[in-house]
Image (cartoon, rainbow, N blue to C red):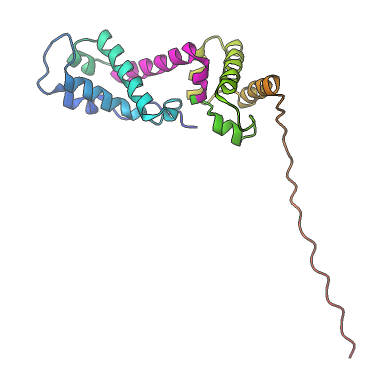
Amino acid sequence: MKKILLCVPLLALFAAGLIGCSQQRQWNHEQRKAMREALRSYRQMVYLDDLTDAEFVLFTDDVAGQLENSYPVYVEFVEMQGVDDTVDMVVVSTIVDELDADAHNMRHIYPYSALVAQGVLPAGLDHSQQQAFYKCFAGKVNAAYATTEQFFNAILADTTDLSQIRQMESQCANDLFSWVVTEVDITETIPAAPAAAPAQKK
């Protein structure tokens, strides 16, 4: 699972937006475009890597809008100390808001197809059944973590207890669909060597 944050300095990616900039208290078209281009560096981040291109565009528009509202003078924003950390924070908080708004968005962290491949869920669940699973799973996550942000930061830091997460998923699968996740021990069988041909009498 990919859990990266921005690894390219934002200031370099924002350079195009600085051309002809002034102290206007609203970003212009080129500055917004530079911001959206910079946010493409987050495309492989966990959760965002599962969004469709259209969903990702809406996400970056949301993040860019929040940043513009908070820092209306573009040149001051891109030159301020800690700009990378600020963008990281807004990206993470926006993801957390989406998770809090709709439990079904958990599918972007734990996609249904991956859970089927892992044997956690049965194949063929319809949309409403998948929604029920993610709602159940989100409820267990909320009970285990103080906040959704704490849970998501644990994913980014790769400190989640995978056995605990799998237990939550398995409990929901069993409660909703009577689906039992079993571990199968695979025993390698070594075929017996062919019997030696009997010696011919001379």
Residue at the limit of the structure toward the right, as seen here: 201
| Relative to 111, 69 lies left or right | left
The residue positioned 87% from the left and 82% from the top of the image is 199
Q: Is residue 35 left or right of residue 162?
A: left
Query: In the image, what residue occupies the spot 52% across and 19% down?
Result: 104
Which picture quadrant has residue 126? Answer: top right
User: Farthest residue toward the left?
Assistant: 20
> Residue 115: x and y, percent?
59, 31
> Is 45 left or right of 134, judged from the image as shown?
left
Residue at the bottom extreme, as displayed: 202
Q: How many marks?
A: 0
x%, y% of residue 65?
28, 14
Q: Kindly tell me whether residue 157 is visible in this rendering.
A: no
Quadrant of the image occupied by residue 45: top left
Task: Look at 90% across and 87% down and name the residue there.
Answer: 201
| Magenta region, main secondary structure | helix
Where residue 53 sits in the image (x, y, percent)? 36, 29
Instruction: Quarter of the image for the C terminus: give it.
Output: bottom right
Q: Is residue 112 visible?
A: yes
Q: Position of residue 123 (x, y in %)?
A: 62, 33
Q: Which residues are magenta?
A: 82-107
Q: Check if residue 86 falls in the magenta segment.
A: yes
